[in-house]
């Protein structure tokens, strides 16, 4: 009996799940949170209710998106494995091809924003393999699923969904059709909608900011993102460090922002391998390289790269890919 009871409860649960997935197959128009969002966008942003209802009627809940966002963070890869994904001969070669194809736009971006061409190329290379991998989810599905059916991040993704509606209207882009990552990041440089609105630019001046299909806009937009996050033109990014016996291990990897001067770091047995003024601020990093520990110092511009993705390994991979490209440009 207990088993039968449990089974019938399971069956009931299954039917419930089935019903909810069937309901979701009909789109989001009737979801209370979608209704509230439509109401708000009509009232505060002057959207047309019928158009929004049609858009959300076509928005689909995607279980693969919910699975992707809830997946436990992968055990952090050691640096040498992470590096081997991004700093490769193929990605360098493809970067050179991208750089040659778009050399005029890259040079113009470098002049206008003060951001090196190879850095812009490396970001686009790490994010999407130079546009080969811009994401296959409809952005309206991704953002609706996460805003309405993923309570832990609902406020964040509702904000992105609002920005997406406004952005597509501003640019005259089809809100029901654009594609991106499962988290709604779009285009060559994978901008989420709030970044799109804040930092993307119409770099080919055709009247539309399109970083999804237009590599020229994407190049200007990545450069502008860096400039707006205070990239300092002409300054270095990072340099190898050396450490003395009994160095301050607790000063390694303790924050992305450069907080200690080289003079202070020296008192902890951490030294640069290049000539820099003693009052230069740095963050000290230890990476697990193939042949044991590697020590690095990140300067202000290293920190700026982490504003794109808050990870030291990400910034180091972008930097090293950019160097590999620069050496052969
Ligand atoms: Ca444009």
Image (cartoon, helix red, strand yellow):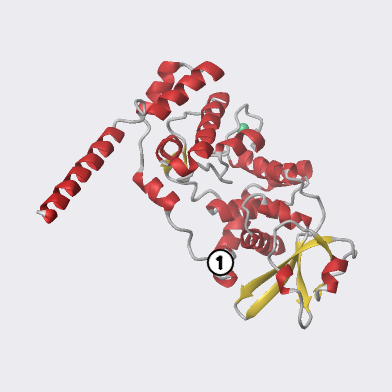
Q: Quadrant of the N terminus?
A: bottom left
Relative horizontal placement of residue 66, taking residue 132 as reference (left or right): left
Say which quarter of the image contains residue 221: top right
Q: Where residue 100 appears, x then y in whole percent?
A: 64, 52
Relative horizontal placement of residue 101, taking residue 244 as reference (left or right): left
Q: Where residue 139 appears, x then y in whole percent?
A: 46, 37
Q: Nearer the viewer, residue 178 or 261?
A: 261
Name the residue rendered at 19%, 41% in the picture. Answer: 15
Report ligand 1 position as a quadrant. top right
Name the residue rendered at 59%, 61% in the picture. Answer: 93
Q: Is residue 46 visible?
A: no
Say above or below: 255 vs 225: below
Q: Nearer the viewer, residue 90 or 80?
A: 80
Task: Count the numbered circles shown.
Answer: 1
Q: Where residue 320 appears, x then y in whole percent?
A: 67, 64
Say which quarter of the image contains residue 45: top right
The residue most toward the front is 2
Q: Quadrant of the C terminus?
A: bottom right
Q: Is residue 234 visible?
A: yes
Say above or below: 159 vs 86: above
Say above or below: 118 vs 150: below
Residue carrying label 1? 82
Mark 1: secondary structure? helix
Q: Nearer the viewer, residue 186 or 268?
A: 268
| Mark 1 sits near ligand 1, with its Cβ under 8 Å away | no
The residue most toward the bottom is 245
Q: Where residue 162 appears, x then y in whole percent?
A: 52, 29
Q: Nearer the viewer, residue 275 or 43?
A: 43
Question: Crowding near pointer 1: few (<14 within 10 Å), some, many (20+)?
Answer: some
Name the residue rendered at 60%, 51% in the picture. Answer: 124
């Amino acid at each position: 009996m207990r088993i039968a009871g449990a089974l019938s409860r399971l069956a009931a649960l299954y039917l419930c799940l089935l019903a909810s997935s069937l309901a979701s197959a009909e789109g989001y128009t009737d979801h209370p949170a979608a209704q509230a969002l439509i109401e708000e966008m009509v009232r505060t942003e002057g959207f047309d209710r019928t158009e929004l209802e049609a858009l959300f009627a076509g928005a689909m809940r995607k279980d693969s998106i919910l699975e992707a966002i809830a997946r436990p963070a992968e055990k952090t890869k050691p640096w040498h494995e992470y590096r081997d994904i991004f700093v490769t001969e193929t990605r360098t070669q493809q970067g050179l091809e991208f750089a040659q194809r778009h050399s005029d736009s890259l040079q113009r971006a470098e002049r206008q924003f003060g951001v090196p061409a190879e850095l812009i190329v490396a970001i686009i290379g790490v994010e999407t393999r130079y546009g080969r991998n811009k994401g296959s989810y409809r952005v309206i599905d991704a953002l609706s699923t996460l805003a309405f059916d993923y309570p832990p991040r609902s406020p964040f993704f509702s904000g992105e969904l609002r920005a997406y509606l406004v952005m597509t209207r501003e640019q005259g882009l089809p809100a029901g059709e654009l594609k991106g990552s499962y988290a709604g990041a779009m285009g060559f440089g994978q901008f989420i909608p709030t970044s799109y609105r804040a930092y993307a630019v119409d770099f080919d001046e055709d009247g539309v900011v399109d970083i999804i299909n237009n590599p020229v806009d994407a190049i200007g937009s990545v450069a502008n993102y860096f400039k707006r996050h205070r990239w300092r033109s002409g300054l270095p990014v990072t340099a190898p460090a050396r450490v003395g016996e009994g160095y301050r291990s607790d000063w390694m990897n303790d924050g992305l922002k450069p907080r200690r001067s080289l003079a202070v770091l020296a008192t902890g047995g951490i030294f640069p391998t290049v000539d820099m003024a003693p009052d230069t601020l740095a963050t000290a990093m230890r990476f697990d390289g193939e042949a044991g520990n590697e020590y690095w110092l990140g300067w202000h511009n290293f920190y700026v790269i982490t504003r794109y993705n808050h990870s030291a390994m990400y910034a180091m991979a972008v930097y090293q890919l950019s160097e590999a490209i620069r050496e052969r440009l």
